Amino acid sequence: MPTPILAPSTDPVVNELLKLNQQLLDAIAAGDWDAYRSLVADDITCFEAEAEGHLVQGLAFHEFYFKLGGGKPQPPKHLTTTMVAPKVRLLGDGAALVAYVRLVQKLDAEGKPITVSSEETRIWQKVAGRWQHVHFHRS
């Protein structure tokens, strides 16, 4: 089961953001487009390796990767996603930054366990009373 490596915060907003961020990572791992879509703004922006240095805007780029699996959620087999030492910085009442190292433990093509890591920064914004993921940078 995916779990963040951190001490629980005394701030309920920080805990809520960490929970939402883990739900986002779980949706990505499971290929669950509907769950991902429910957490992400329509106009999300990002920098990630798949974009080859370009700023991506909107959901179409991301939807392509979700649809590769047939568009149906698949429970991850032998896959664990962990946020290591996440840091939440509240940017006023309606925005927050979540930064961490993401570890993905899985099996390679030969069935051997491997761990892949990336550094991620995600921006969340409160829109109409609910948090939405609006930008990320992954490297």
Image (cartoon, rainbow, N blue to C red):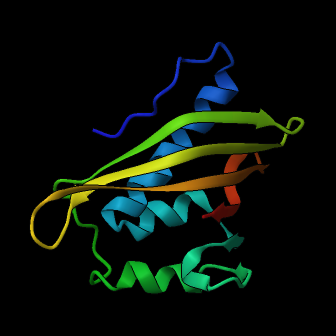
Q: Quadrant of residue 4?
A: top left
Q: Residue at x 57, y 57 (%)?
A: 39
Count of all numbered marks drawn on residues in the image = 0
Residue farthest to the left, as pictured: 111
Q: Residue at x 45, y 53 (%)?
A: 25
Q: Is residue 85 above or below residue 114?
A: above
Asked whether 55 or 27 is in front, the reply is 55
**Which quadrant of the figure contains the N terminus?**
top left
Q: Is residue 53 left or right of residue 103?
A: right
Q: Quadrant of residue 65?
A: bottom left
Q: Quadrant of residue 3?
A: top left
Q: Is residue 92 left or right of residue 37?
A: right
Residue 124: percent from left, percent from top: 72, 50
Residue 100: percent from left, percent from top: 59, 43
Residue 79: percent from left, percent from top: 25, 54
**Which quadrant of the figure contains the C terminus?**
bottom right
Residue farthest to the top, as pictured: 10
Residue 68: percent from left, percent from top: 33, 85
Residue farthest to the right, as pictured: 92
Q: Residue at x 66, y 34 (%)?
A: 87
Q: Is residue 128 above or below residue 137?
A: above
Asked whether 80 or 22 is in front, the reply is 80
Q: Residue at x 68, y 47 (%)?
A: 131
